[in-house]
Amino acid sequence: MTGLSIDKLSMRFDLPDGVSVQALKDVSLDLKAGELMSVLGPSGCGKTTLLNIVAGFLAPTDGTVSLNGHVVQGPDAERGMVFQQGALFEWMSVRENVGFGPSMKGMPKPEKDQIVNRLLDVVGLQDFKEKAVYELSGGMQQRVALARCLANDPDVILMDEPLGALDALTREKMQGLVLKLWKETGKTIILITHSVEEALLLGERLIVMAPRPGTYSQGIPAALCRHGVVEDLRVVKKHPDFAVKREEILGMIWDMEEEIMGRQEEGA
């Protein structure tokens, strides 16, 4: 089977004081190769935990994650991660950061340089390739992080709030870049975000997770990203379906947050 399969995934954290926290419970879903899925949910519902398990950074308590029929048992270049903060090597130049993965693989320099130069063109940083990353703006650093991830040619790209720290204008530009890269590379992408608008703009498919213990609550066909590939994102936001789906999802998450607050008040 090609694509990503998450089967009855559960994650429990056992704390030193003897208390256990059930972060995820019986999460199951499948992603086709080349699908872009955005993930929403109230704070603490296990979105990042789910992403870290798919990345191989955490081993689940129960269940499995499989990619192209192989069970995920740890980090691997087939799954690339883009964090909220770029997690770049500040002592390296932009070019060196993007080429880090191919260098670690022992790729011949001419081949590596070709890949790096192509990706720097794609993310619009060719003129900044010899700059140190600390000299770049936040948006530029995230473009470096995207290029570095793509340089490893992963099957799946995992994005954990990659645009959350950016200002509104830069964020919108980066959303357009994510869609452009998705269209050009055909990569499978899972995007975690707290922004309903962003989830709708970028998700070919959108899932909402329920409060802790995190479970797969509901899948919502979005596909507005298909418009975003060929239209300005501001035009997409004016699409009649956009406002309707945004209010539907906001209401769903608001109800979940109210439920959480009610539980906390009862336990106080």
Image (tube, rainbow, N blue to C red):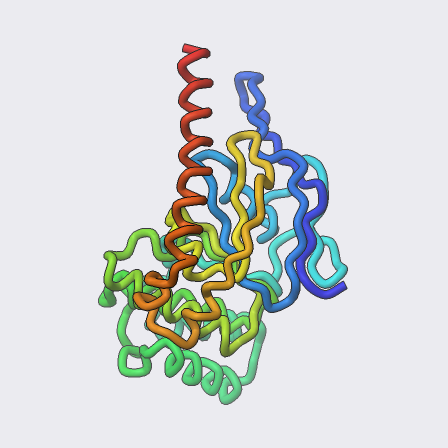
Q: Nearer the viewer, residue 34 or 77?
A: 34
Q: Nearer the viewer, residue 63 or 80?
A: 63
Give the left or right position of residue 25, taking residue 247 as reference: right
Give the left or right position of residue 58, taking residue 125 as reference: right
Quarter of the rendering occupied by the N terminus: bottom right
Q: Position of residue 121 (x, y in %)?
A: 37, 83
Answer with the quarter of the image where residue 34 lies.
bottom right
| Residue 72 can be seen, yes or no | no
| Residue 70 can be seen, yes or no | yes
Give the left or right position of residue 107, taking residue 98 as reference: right
The vertical placement of 92 against 43, above or below, is below
Give the left or right position of residue 6, taking residue 172 as reference: right
Q: Position of residue 87 (x, y in %)?
A: 39, 57
Answer with the quarter of the image where residue 148 lies.
bottom left
- At horizontal 62% and vertical 65% (from top left) the residue drawn is 78
- At horizontal 44% and vertical 31% (from top left) the residue drawn is 255
In the rendered image, the residue lying farthest to the front is 240
Q: Nearer the viewer, residue 249 or 40?
A: 249
Q: Position of residue 64 (x, y in %)?
A: 71, 46
Q: Position of residue 108 (x, y in %)?
A: 55, 84
- At horizontal 39% and vertical 74% (from top left) the residue drawn is 96
